[in-house]
Image (cartoon, coloured by chain):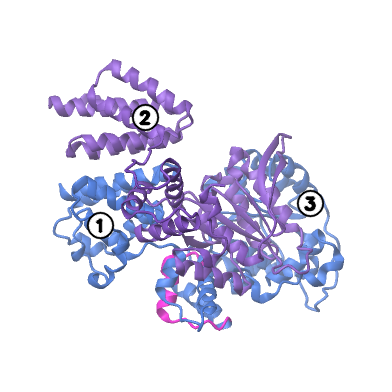
Chain colours: A purple, B blue
Amino acid sequence: MLWVDDYRPKTLDGLHYHVGLSQRLKSLAASGDFPHMLFYGPSGAGKKTRIAATLNELFGSGVERIDQRVFLTPSRKKLDVNVVQSNYHIELTPSEVGNYDRVVIQEIIKEIAQTQQVDVSAKHRFKVVVINEADSLSRDAQAALRRTMEKYMSNLRIILCANSTSRLIAPIKSRCLLIRVAAPNHEEMLTVLNHVAKRAGAGSLPEDRADEIISDANGNMRKAILVFEAMKMQSPDLSSSLAIAKPDWETYCYKVGDMIIQEQTPQRVMEVRTKLYELLSHCIPPTIILKTIADRVVQKVDESLKADIMHWAAIYENRMRIGNKKIYHLEAWVVKVMSLYKQFFLGIELGDFDDFI
Amino acid sequence: MATSFFQARAPAKKKSGKEKENVVNPSLQPWVEKYRPETIDDVSSQEHIVSVLRKTLSSSNLPHMLFYGPPGTGKTSTILALARQLFGPDNFRSRVLELNASDERGISIVREKVKNFARQTPRAEAVASDGKKYPCPPYKIIILDEADSMTQDAQAALRRIMENYARITRFCLVCNYVTRIIEPLASRCSKFRFKPLDSSSARQRLEHIALAEKVPVNEDVISALVSTSSGDLRRAVTYLQSAARLSAATEPPSAILPQDIQEIAGVVPDAIIRKLAQTLGVDVTLIGGRDGDVEMGDAASLTVEPDLRGFDLIRETVRSLIREGYSASQVLSQWLKAHSQLHDVIVEHPTLTGRQKSACALVMAEADKALCDGADEELWILEVALRVHKAVTS
């Protein structure tokens, strides 16, 4: 197994950082009246780990099994959803099925809500439904949660897990206890890395290597541990000054960024286009592509241009969400950046051009 | 009274032999349910609506109704309380059909379920088991909760049904956005607008609940609850309960502090917003409020390398903000709120002109729209930060 999974803390006491938060969760789990909860925070901060540990605290360890459930839409379309369930909880990602997530929510909640806990020895009467990626639930699905969350409170608790609360509707937020899981800071990450090193028997982790890993991970604990493991695989003694291997797509994106800076011609746009297509066809999310390239470009341009480049990145990223074809907007941004750059160098104002934004 | 509501419905779904076991332990209930108003007179702060509805209790005549207003103002509570007062616990189940967004409400359901229920003639009045007398008027009520999430077609299908069975059935539509209800439906109903709770009645209700639950709270905590919930009583009650749980669970039980409420509500601490504003070149020392020096300790979590300038400084600040996990919309709204609360100070702010302030407001509006569309949070917070910076420093 990967270290990330292997050394994932199973209990609230085993968690290394946000001690105050763990304490709260523990007292909540002990108190009996457990509220609906919404965990939010950046990825790799440990939301899922905390949810799992809370469940463990609530019910003790149970046997989990992975199932595939089939839901039927009113129009008799079949939907397959993967769920993880135990006797006490069920975990699912309704956004897997896109627009039909409402059906999944309606069915699953009703099903759980209408079945009683039959096990007399169970610690709690209720079951828990864990909904992952709650921020990508459609509005309909969120609306479907509203009244049910109140009505079936005796049989059911909901734990939502999201990256941000921006996209959740207010009625949902007002029914949940909001739990913010911030990304760990430098020292906290160092503690965790050292702990993993010790557990894995990898010897001590040199401090400068640890610093490198941490600054590369940018608050993402999962990434940090994965990188650490990869490094360990490459050089078991951790001493050689091996650079942290960047993922292929990242170097590729950087290359695209460099190409934009080197030359601003229609030919170059075509070359960039093929590269972008290549990235998209490898399933790199377009937002990530845009952000990575933008990062690279702003490193290389004059201070006065940086704000504008990020401005257009924000605009085109938004359009990409609303629109259908991602490549148009990526390209539009590339062309925009090229024209900004060229204008800056030639010192001319192409004011009329702005009408076509 | 929520318990009786639960019990009334429970036997239909579960095996009747288990009825006794289904009684919910009141101490484990969410307070939102526990303190739902039992009669319409208990409904906070909506005097006008209550007075109109009280007349219907005595006259036993009821129009079709459309309740609309922001969340947590008591729309669902009002109609449930009214229905209970009209029919009593025994007839409640046979006379009231409640459908909400969690039920399938496509056009087929409207055609079958709603229509079937609407066309049944209500049975003759039975003697209430609890000895009280209920008006029990000769019609049924269909509550369509969260009606704004019904499709246009389903709403259209309701039109004729509402008229045809008006003699024996009343509809009550409950929604947040009245604009999402099609015009023909809205014109068939008498509309009731629920306004956000004013702070005094919210305060009163919270104190009542705190007293009943024996939770020690002081003025500051209630104020924090009222201000963070902005007129949404349900949110305030949920926060109060969460805070009470957390404080009761520690050993020894600690007092509830306003900061706890803020943390539960997911509010970004003042100090962090100030730090951010400072990074952008807004002169925070001139903005009033509490003493800046004391609070700066909180902002230490936003660590940025000291030798960064301009663009890189802003970008690093934004990144650390995102890493802390604060949601972008919260940051934005608080930003705006901070501006409006401290409006007077900002107006007299020596360096901020009206033009600069409008530029800030404009970019925040754009960002809000983008975030609603699901745009990337980091990019947009950065965008807001950069443009505010530009506006303020130019």
Q: Earlier in the sequence, mark 3 or mark 1?
A: 3
| Picture layout, residue A164 above or below residue B11 | above
- Disc number lying in front (2 or 1): 2
Q: Which chain carries label 2?
A: A
- When asked about the image quadrant of residue B294, the answer is bottom left
Q: Which chain carries label 3?
A: B
Say whether residue B215 is magenta: yes
Residue at x 25%, y 57% (from the top left corner): B277
Residue A355 x %, y %? 27, 27
Return the residue at label 1: B277
Residue B143 x %, y %? 68, 56
Q: Is residue A333 left or right of residue A44?
A: left
- What kind of element bears circle 2? helix
Say yes or no: labels 2 and 1 on the same chain: no
Return the residue at label 3: B117
Rate crowding at label 1 as few (under 14), some (14 to 19) or many (20 or more) other CA atoms within 10 Å.
Answer: some
| Picture layout, residue A273 above or below residue B378 | above
Return the residue at label 2: A252
Amino acid type at circle 1 is Ala
- What kind of element bears circle 3? helix
Residue B71 x %, y %? 53, 59
Say whether residue B40 is magenta: no
- When asked about the image quadrant of residue B249, the answer is bottom right
Alpha-carbon span between mark 2 and mark 3: 63 Å
Residue A177 x %, y %? 52, 64
Region of the chain picked out in magenta, as a range:
B213-234
Say yes or no: labels 3 and 1 on the same chain: yes
Amino acid type at circle 3 is Phe
Front-most of residues A156 and A149: A156
